[in-house]
Amino acid sequence: SQTIHQWPATLVQPVGSPLSLECTVEGTSNPNLYWYRQAAGRGLQLLFYSVGIGQISSEVPQNLSASRPQDRQFILSSKKLLLSDSGFYLCAGTVNEKLFFGSGTQLSVL
Amino acid sequence: QKEVEQNSGPLSVPEGAIASLNCTYSDRGSQSFFWYRQYSGKSPELIMSIYSNGDKEDGRFTAQLNKASQYVSLLIRDSQPSDSATYLCAASNNDMRFGAGTRLTVKP
């Protein structure tokens, strides 16, 4: 079965520091991959999605970027974090058009 | 702007009642539609998927899709306290987009 691995579970970073969150997928090949952010008590904001290696669609212009160096690896990055980047970050991948989520990273920028 | 909108709630129903959750989407190119359940602090989990017009039933859950009206709904029959959660609607044209969610509380 497919599994979305995402780490770390929690992260506290100072304003202005860099960020790298990695997500890997097991059990399927050529998945669509997604990064979402969820503010407390709010819905899922689509940040980036990828339909293949090196193919990234950006939904929200901001100081975040994403890369897909391998078929089952999706990375979310920032050169300088802002306070507003705090939130619950979720990686997800599709298998047979159904979306499965990783366990999420709770990011606090202080 | 491609959007998915849900009735914001919160929605409260007594145990054993039917809970009705509604969703509309703006992108007519959307081909796939989903309902997810999310408990506080956890990742969303898939409840149902629906791809064609009409009803789809799975146990106590029934999803309804009307592409002409760009409308998706979820009915939960015989609601249980364990159904208390936030329910997220999603529509996809490769770009899986979610609504803001509806918080459901089932009171014993």
Image (cartoon, coloured by chain):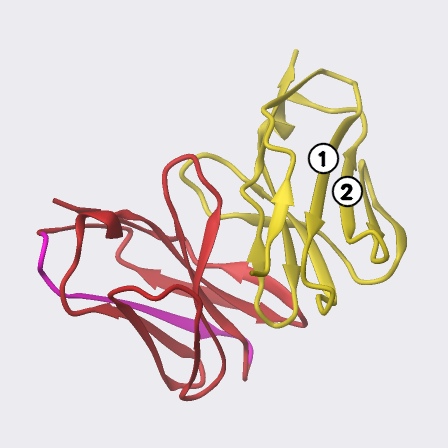
Chain colours: A red, B yellow
- Three-letter residue code for mark 1: Leu
Question: Where are the magenta residues, as a range?
Answer: A15-28
- Image point (74%, 24%), residue name: B79
Mark 2: secondary structure: strand
Magenta stretch encompasses residue A5: no
- Image point (76%, 48%), residue name: B72
Residue A41 falls left or right of residue A20: right
User: Label 2 is found on which chain of the structure?
Assistant: B
**CB atoms of marks 2 and 1 within 8 Å:** yes
Residue A21 in the image: above or below residue A12 = below
Residue B100 in the image: above or below residue B48 = above
How far separated are the C-alphas under marks 2 and 1? 6 Å
User: Label 1 is found on which chain of the structure?
Assistant: B
> Are discs 2 and 1 both within one chain?
yes
Residue A1 in the image: above or below residue A88 = below
Mark 1: secondary structure: strand
Residue A2 falls left or right of residue A66: right
Rendered-image quadrant of the N terminus of chain A: bottom right
Residue named by callout 2: B73
- Three-letter residue code for mark 2: Ser
Residue named by callout 1: B21
- N-term mark: 2 or 1: 1
Residue A5 falls left or right of residue B56: left
